[in-house]
Image (spheres, rainbow, N blue to C red):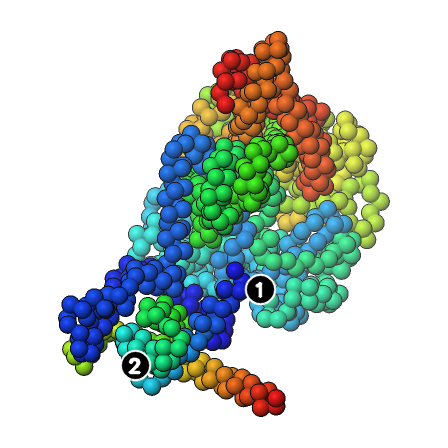
Amino acid sequence: MRVTRRDRARTFVARMWESVHRKRIMTEFDDELRTHLELETAYNVQRGMTPEDAARAAKIAIDGAHAWRDEVRDARGFSVIDNLVRDIRFAFRQLRRTPAFTASIAATLAIGIGATTAVFAVLDSVILRPLPYPNADRLVGVWWSLPGMGFPLGPQSLSTYFAIRRLSHSFEGIAAFDRTAVNVASRGGDERGERLTGAATTASLFPLLGARFIAGRPYTAAEDVPNGTPVVVISEGMWRRRFGADPKVIGKQLLVDGRAHTIVGVVASSFHFPDDVTQLWTPIALDSAAAFGGPFAHQSFALLKPGVTIEQARRELTRLMPRMGELYPDIAPSMRLTDFLNQAHAGIVVHPMRNDVVGGFGNIALIAAFAGVLLFAIALANAASLLLTRAEGRQRELALRVVLGASTRRVLAQFVSEALLLGALGGAAGLTIAIVGVRQLVGAAPQGIPRLSEIGLHPSAVAFAIGITIAMAFACSAIAWLRLDVRNLGKRLRDGSRGGTAGRDRQRARRTLVVTQVAFATLLVTGAAFLLQNAYRLRRADPGFDASHTLTAWISLPTVTYPHDSDAVHFAQRLVTRVRQLPGVTAAGVSSKLPMFGLGSTYTPVWSDADPGTSTTLPPSDLALAASDGFFTALGIPLVAGRDFQPIGRQSPYEAIIDRSLARLYWGDSTGARAIGRRIRLTQDPKSDSWYTVIGVVGSVADTSLAGPTVGVVYLPNVTSPDTNRSMVMRVMALAVRSSGDPRATRTLVERAIADVDASVPPFRVKPMADVLRESTARLWFMVTILTTTGTIALLLAAIGLYGVLSYLVSSRAKEMSIRMAMGALPSTVAAFVTRQGVAMAGTGVVIGAVAFLLLSRYIESVQSGLSRPAIATVVAAPVALLCITVLASWVPARRAARADPARALSAD
Amino acid sequence: MARTDSAEQVLQGTLDLLILKTLSLEPMHGWGLAHRIQALSRDALQVGQGSIYPAVVRLEQRGWVSTHWRTTENNRRAKYYAITSAGRRALGQELASWKRFVAAVSLVMDAT
């Protein structure tokens, strides 16, 4: 009969199903047999036999009913299952007999599987899983590259946003947003407000992201206009927390920065944008009729039309660049958009929105993945070498079985079932480790890890764990199987040989595994040491300010209670005066920005009187901040030339303080002396007299990164001025307070002082400047933590591996060593021999690992800027430490070899 | 080893064919099937009664034969085997190729 592939498939499925119900099926067959017997007896009686004869005949006719039964069992395919069950039982007994071995290999597997799964789970949650929006694959970030201005990635200007929205045909829609932080209070409530993270967005944002509303609606385009109705969308979390899940919340009023907003919608908790902590959204109200395009300040993303590729969209936008300048000629007075784009060497960047969300996490992810893979490889090598050692111990038993007729297939099945059983043990423990590990990792994660709320062990991670468990089990048993050469076991047993050459081969295999482990461990530990070196360098690096005794706090003034700029200046004046009166406070001041923290960054081109005033080229961009007197003293920024500002309220709007790097850039004098009295301006608008006189030069500070290049900073007075270009009034301000003691001790005093001035403005991010500084290097420290943890585990595994192999070496060559000792070799010579073996293996691994690290570090340098070159101490110290540990690991077996009693070893066999 | 395999396969194939052919006439229980086949082949094939059972298991797993319990005319509960439509298709194909084979053989035989 012709049996097609489909018939085979049906058979397979039927067998799977039947094997589950095999007890019932075999009982049913017994019934069938009984019927058969009865029918046969009746038939024979009918033919004239006596019932006794008939029954006997029937029994003969179906003689060997047991044989029928077995045949049916085989036909059903149950024997395979039975064998498997038997193999697993056998393996289980074997493993129970050697608990130490079982525990060590299961632990190795558990560590390998656990660590790798934990790393995978985080990468999967953050990077691999699609963003939690429908159409996530078509969402793209739309950016400018402005290399001429020093910005690899710049957001949209109001003008470019509207131009793209109007001209482009690549997108179904485009949205823009700003990240905000707002003071929120309930209408009529007299409680202290709270400070929340929010976003100001275009109305197009919610439909583009497919946001699900559990009440109300998103705001409309009609509400997203300048001077539109103030409306707000809140998160489900905020609705539950602040409104007790009030079903009638829609239409209620919420004071956002002091202004009443109507709640129009509650968005489901599954919606996160732009990050996990955002709790309310308000219309961004971009003015499409604005005279000037404005700064490049709004982040934007778009939804590609189906079928349009990222590259097509990028090309279309690049083509549209000249026409953008026609729609919005000027971005600021006397600053043409076209000129700006030309000078900035502007280009369009369109990339998957995932890049924007994942952001700088990419490097951490890469290092974590790298550590995970290495750890996995080490655990695999370790497990394989342990299994190999064990298999060798059973060589005789296996050979005997093969000689007695066990098929090699059955022996292999035994190997695999044992490895699978070990894998199941290790995998289960590994999964537990992964669950705990992920939780630890999330707990240790620095602020700003993207998609933190989504991190967890998703089904894909569990599947991954099961997959690598099975892969590990098969790989381990395959290595042991191949090395043992089971097929020829029987032959070797007959020949009476103990497998001399094969034994040497196996030794080599095991040595290779150990060398690999040590090499990988070296790579991990050296990598960790390298990052540690950088982290310590950054900790020691001079940030340009003295953070040791300074407390900082942020305050945001609502426009409702502080309608006029002069009110805000007055607040700052009262605040600084009040704080300076506090006991222990030696200096206090305010500024629109703190070093090493992004809030308040505004970059602007700065022209100087050293520049002859060529209007066609833009000068470099610098940070333009507002500051009060006392700010520099409070933060410990040295005044290198000139003087500080006048006290608030008496500050002159025509004075500016610059940092040393600008003094050197414009007037070629880093002492600052030559800059005093010279002039700078932030605009070329000929209509206003926009010059500032430099009255002081202060030290440069690290602003975004301790490792990165410093930027120039212009500090402007916190004053109102009839000239709007000159008005630099802070509504969001950072207070810096220097005290003689621990800055933490002044915290309560400072908070009370702020409440004394105005109890309705909650201070936020109140923390010592030292903490701000530490947070800036948190990511690096996080990476260091990952690498040191995995490096330590790797070291431990490698030491176990080395120990196992040397122990085996000692036991398998006990005879040889005993002879040597009987011939007069000193115990120390024998110990030295064993140790030398260990050091040789470890040494090879360490050298390979160190070379691999040096090669890899070049690559890392090309990817991650701001890292120092690996110090010689780093490259040497980690391997030397590793070598010491391996010497220790080989010392125990070496001593055992040296102490062996020659007489006993020789008579043992 | 390989030779016995293929000889076994030929025997199995013939038995499968006989069972399907028999069941295509009417559903039957195992005992009836065994006797009918012994009678049909006039004991030439030497099919032991027990060989029926692994064979019907194979056919059942392929979906060519279905089974159900019911009472015989003598009020005994027995498991009945019936051919399925897939089984009829397989039988039809096999019979056709069998007839082609017989025709080819007789052509050769007649030519000599």
Q: Position of residue A679 (x, y in %)?
A: 76, 38
Tell me where residue A524 sits by quadrant.
top right
Frontmost of labels 2 and 1 is 2
Q: Which residue is mark 2?
A: B27
Measuring from the top left, give residue A351's x and y in whole percent. Answer: 64, 58
Foreground: A751 or A23? A23
Instruction: Give residue A440's quadrant in the image.
Output: top left
Q: Amino acid at mark 2?
A: Pro
Q: State the mark number for residue A497.
A: none
Give the residue at mark 1: A138
Within 10 angstroms of label 2, few (less than 14), some, or many (20 or more) residues? some
Whole-percent x and y of residue A165?
62, 67
Q: Amino acid at mark 1?
A: Arg
| Residue A302: quadrant of the picture | bottom right
Drawn side of residue A378 relative to residue A861, left or right: left
- The residue under the point 42% across, 29% down is A100
Check disc 2 and report its element: helix, strand or loop: loop
Determine the chain carrying the residue at label 2.
Answer: B
| Residue A240 image position (x, y, % from top left) | 33, 52
Residue A245: in sight, yes or no? yes
Q: Are marks 2 and 1 on the same chain?
A: no
Mark 1 belongs to which subunit? A
| Residue A291 can be seen in this image | no
Tell me what residue is drawn at x 64 percent, y 49 percent.
Answer: A724
